[in-house]
Image: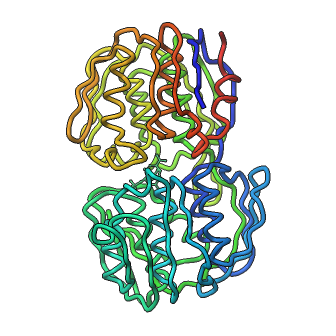
Amino acid sequence: MRLTIKPVRQLKGQITVPGDKSISHRAVMLGALARGTTVVENFLMGEDCLATVNCFKELGVHIEGPVDGRLTIQGAGLDGLREPARVLDAGNSGTTTRLMLGILAGQPFCSVITGDESLNKRPMARVTKPLSQMGAVFLGRQDNNLLPLAVRGGKLKPIDFISPVASAQIKSAVLLAGLFAHGQTSVTEPTVSRDHTERMLRYFGAEVTTSGTTVTVQGRPRLEGNRLRVPGDISSAAFFMVAAAIIPDSQITLEGVGINPTRSGIIEVLQQMGAQVRLINQRQYGQEPVADIIIAGGELRSTEIAGAMIPKLIDEIPVLAVAAACAKGTTVFRDAGELRVKESDRIAALATELAKFGTAVEELPDGLMIHGGTTLTGTTCRSYGDHRMAMAMAVAGLAAQGQTVIEDAGCMAVSYPGFVDALNKLSVE
Ligand SMILES: O=C(O)C1=C[C@@H](OP(=O)(O)O)[C@@H](O)[C@H](O)C1
Ligand SMILES: C=C(OP(=O)(O)O)C(=O)O
């Protein structure tokens, strides 16, 4: 699918962004491992989360929906998953794969998991290594680094794992495997990554403690089915936050967005850059904080984004790079080497595509230097099959002079199937 974007005069109005992708994945996983029924509202109907649902159906879990964001899971209990008859298909989803590998590591049976062309190039040794130390056996290319991977699990022992990367997928894979081991499993990260797994484990009744950058889970918990409402995804809200920030005289409200402090770095960064961001109606959905976000544009100025801030906005960097292209001065992103192993090499992809809009960009090994403030020129750009690139380039097109075409934009459905409708609703031509 090719998406054509015309510049807009303003963004105005109010929308609700779809459910959070990270939290939707975890809701299915913990619902499947709990006893009793779990009902999830505002489940993300994106392709990634549907892949997780299908994997659990293959593992014998009875799941109804999602219909209009409502998903009902009849939990199988910690020991109730069944050996799958077919290869599990994680599609484009790194989260599905890495978290599933943690769960499969705990199962006394054999399973095989694979993904699409992009996912089958992404590194998995970061989880198969610690999970092997716990006792799981893997078979896969490049010393168990690449999908497809075969897993023979069961009889896990707890570990204290020190992760070289601040990654919620690594942390979650080890913590989920830790559910199947007797005793305490801990993960220590260099800086804190998103903590949705910890929060949801507690919500389902597990014992999880956090001390600094170390998280510990007590094995063999009694997980009880629960009801939960998934907050709106701040990573989806991000596209409209930046769009409103870069298009003069815009003001929009995004309702019911998750503002978990391990995820909400974009709010702080856009404020630093000069955008007006206000949170109202702060409330809780289960263990997760939520607010309505009001954002208005202004003259944006450059900033530096590095260190412990990076994991708090890792998926928002493509669209923040667009904000940087529209901001006066040079914005630097550092310590973001992880972007090279996402759905595409997002550092290389951003450098190439922003240059097509006329922005001067320097590619760094672990980030980007963006010389912003010149007017963008509409162009034809590629998505690299990466949903976040497609939507970030659409936002750049809104602020550009002339028309922008995004090739291969269908991948937006991975995390935000209704993106174009939401954009049309907010656009004032
Ligand atoms: O745990 C999660 O739900 C996610 C963690 C992040 O990946 P890493 O753990 O690889 O940083 C993020 O990029 C991804 O979109 C979702
Ligand atoms: C990196 C992402 O997802 P995943 O790792 O789950 O494919 C993302 O959504 O930007």
Q: Residue at x 50, y 78 (%)?
A: 104
Name the one closer to the observer, 296 or 390: 390
Q: Is residue 216 left or right of residue 47?
A: left
Residue 355 to residue 191: above or below: above
Figure disc tally:
0
Q: Is residue 71 left or right of residue 284?
A: right
In the rendered image, which quarter is residue 253 located in? top right
Residue 244 to residue 349: above or below: above
Quarter of the image containing the N terminus?
Answer: top right
Place of residue 123 in the rendered image (x, y in percent of width and height, measured from the top left)? 34, 59
Name the one closer to the observer, 76 or 87: 87
Residue 371 to residue 415: above or below: above
Q: Residue at x 63, y 33 (%)?
A: 419
Q: Quadrant of ligand 1?
A: bottom left
Name the one closer to the observer, 339 or 239: 339
Q: Residue at x 65, y 40 (%)?
A: 417
Q: Is residue 295 visible?
A: yes
Q: Is residue 214 visible?
A: no
Q: Is residue 394 left or right of residue 309?
A: right
Quarter of the image containing the C terminus?
Answer: top right
Place of residue 20 in the rendered image (x, y in percent of width and height, measured from the top left)? 59, 49
Colour setting: rainbow
Place of residue 264 in the rendered image (x, y in percent of width and height, measured from the top left)? 46, 43
Place of residue 33 in the rendered image (x, y in percent of width and height, measured from the top left)? 61, 77
In the rendered image, which quarter is residue 376 located in? top left
